[in-house]
Amino acid sequence: MKIIAFAGSNSSKSINKKLATYAASLFENAAVEVLDLNEYEAPLFSVDTEIKIGKAEKADAFVQKINSATVLVVSLAENNGNYSASFKNLIDWCSRIDKGFFQNKPMLLMATSPGGRGGKGVLEIAQNNLPRFDANIQAVFSLPSFEENFDVENNKISNEELNGELKDAVEKLQIIADEKNA
């Protein structure tokens, strides 16, 4: 089983990347690859830019990474209640390459934030929007108050109740992936 994990953020200190990395580490017997959106930067999408350059090569590389996955672990940054600009731009480019670029791969969709809502605004948007691109969202997890609930030194959730919720979500996806590979 191959896990592709990434944060919907281009921050070098992304708390969502930390959460995605931790969640991916919970899968058993899995090869894990954590992507950095900075490696998939593309020009700001517009039809005019697409006419000039064709498809964005880095977006195409991102689509190929998604294709290589058995399971996707995605943790979205919330910027003003919505996707980060970097993630939205990548969606725009990828959807022009392949409208169903998430390829129906089982997905653990997550978000975290410093605040008490834990990115719930962006999760609501993503749950409604990402299936348009063949995202097969099997579990959703929100980690509120990142600094209080995540032990950065040990790279894990410190709140046992929340950690149990995430482990339950991972177990659900583990079963789905194992059945798919059987």
Image: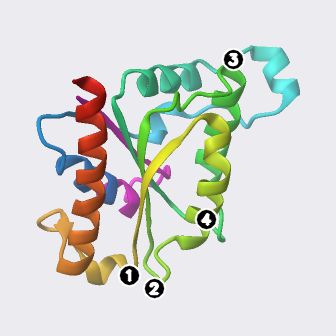
Kindly identify the residue that appears in the image at 36 percent across and 54 percent down.
17
| Magenta span contains residue 5 | yes
Relative horizontal placement of residue 30, taking residue 162 as reference (left or right) = left
Kindly identify the residue that appears in the image at 84 percent across and 17 percent down.
51
Q: Label 1 is placed on what type of residue? A: Ser
Residue position for label 4: 124
What residue range appears in magenta? 1-18
Callouts 1 and 2 close, C-beta under 8 Å: yes
User: Label 1 to label 2, Cα distance in Å?
Assistant: 5 Å
Residue position for label 1: 145
Lower sequence index among marks 1 and 2: 2
Q: In which quarter of the image is the C terminus?
A: top left
Kindly identify the residue that appears in the image at 22 percent across and 61 percent down.
167
Residue position for label 3: 55
Of the pair 168 and 46, the residue shown nearer to us: 168
Q: Position of residue 180 (x, y in %)?
A: 31, 28
Q: Which mark is residue 17?
A: none
Q: Label 3 is placed on what type of residue? A: Lys
Q: Residue 116 carries which label?
A: 2
Mark 1: give few (<14), some (14-19) or many (20+) Cα within 10 Å: some
Lower sequence index among marks 2 and 3: 3
User: Label 1 to label 4, Cα distance in Å?
Assistant: 18 Å
Kindly identify the residue that appears in the image at 28 percent across and 84 percent down.
148
Mark 3: give few (<14), some (14-19) or many (20+) Cα within 10 Å: some
Q: Label 2 is placed on what type of residue? A: Gly
Residue 83 showing in the rendered view: no
User: Label 3 to label 4, Cα distance in Å?
Assistant: 29 Å
Q: Is mark 4 on a helix, strand or loop?
A: helix
Q: In which quarter of the image is the N terminus?
A: top left
